[in-house]
Every structure is written in structure tokens, then in C-alpha cells.
Image (cartoon, grey):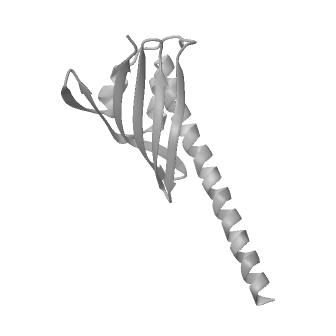
Amino acid sequence: MKKILAITLLAFLSITKVSAQSTEKRLIETTIQYYFDGWMTGDTTKIGKAMHSTCHLKFFRDNKFTDISRADYLSRFKPRAKDKDTEGRIKMLDITGNIASAKCEIETPKSLFTDYFNLIKIDNFWYITDKISTRVDKN
């Protein structure tokens, strides 16, 4: 009887953990979708909602390492219509408690951007706290 009770308890705990993980995954996907939607339309409100105020973005341009603040990054966007041939996708997501890492891609007709996001959950919302990025032109 004790063995059955122990197995039942373990099964319940496993199901609860999977359910919680699934919920966190959906919440992170929501944050990343805000980022994708804002990036593709130049909507800095959406991008800003996804990014923590301390977020920094790092990348190489012209063989030079660049580190920019969230405010600088947001200032580079202008509102525009979404290009129907532009798509964002999450390639990998790894969650540990209230932190996560995501590998994402944004594909445009001209380029493929690969972004790695570090995320943290604060007050029941997931924020991108850091981003590293690379771009490959399709030419």
C-alpha cells in the first residue's frame, strides 16, 4: 500500500512539474512573440514590453564588437508594415526555475538573424534581459 501511495505521489508531482513547465513555456513564448511582432513592424511599445529596462544587445558589425542599451536599440526602429515574407521562430528554449534561455531566428527576404535571449521572470512576467545576435545575408 505504501509503495502504491509513493508511486502515485511521484506521478502526481511529475505531472504538476510538467504542467508548470508548460505554463512557463507559453508565457516565455508570449514575451518572445511581443519581440517578434514589434521587430517586424517597428512597434517599440511591443519590443519594449518584451525587454527588461536593463537589457543590453551585443553583436558584431563590420568586425567590431558592439554593445548597445535597450534605449539605443529601440531608437533605431521606425513604424512600418510587416513584410509578408518575414518570419520569427523559436528554435530552442531552456527553462530553469525563474530563468530561461532561447535561441530564436527572424528570417527576412534578405537576411537571417539568429538571436540568443537570456530571460528572467519578474512579477509573473518573463523579460528578455540580454540578447546576442548575428546576421547572415542571403546574397
Q: Which residue corresponds to the image point at 35% horizontal and 24% vertical from the top-left?
A: 135
Q: Can you give x and y, in whole percent of width and height, for residue 5 in the image? A: 77, 83
Which of these two is toward me, 6 or 54? 6
Q: Residue at x 55, y 52 (%)?
A: 124
Q: 90 or 136, which lies in front?
A: 136
The quadrant of the image that shows the C terminus is top left
Q: Nearer the viewer, residue 79 or 5?
A: 5
Q: Is residue 42 above or below residue 124?
A: above
**Outermost residue, right side:** 1
- The single residue placed furthest to the bottom in the displayed view is 2
Give residue 79's position: percent from left, percent from top.
46, 14
Q: Residue furthest left?
A: 64
How many numbered callouts?
0
Residue at image point 76% right, 76% down = 8
* 55 displayed left or right of 29: left
**Percent of width and height locating residue 19:** 68, 57
Q: Is residue 67 above or below residue 122?
A: above
**Is residue 4 depicted above or below 111 in this figure?**
below
- The residue under the point 53% across, 11% down is 81
Q: Position of residue 40 (x, y in %)?
A: 49, 20
Q: Quadrant of residue 20?
A: bottom right
Q: Quadrant of the N terminus?
A: bottom right
Left or right, 34 with respect to 129, comes to right
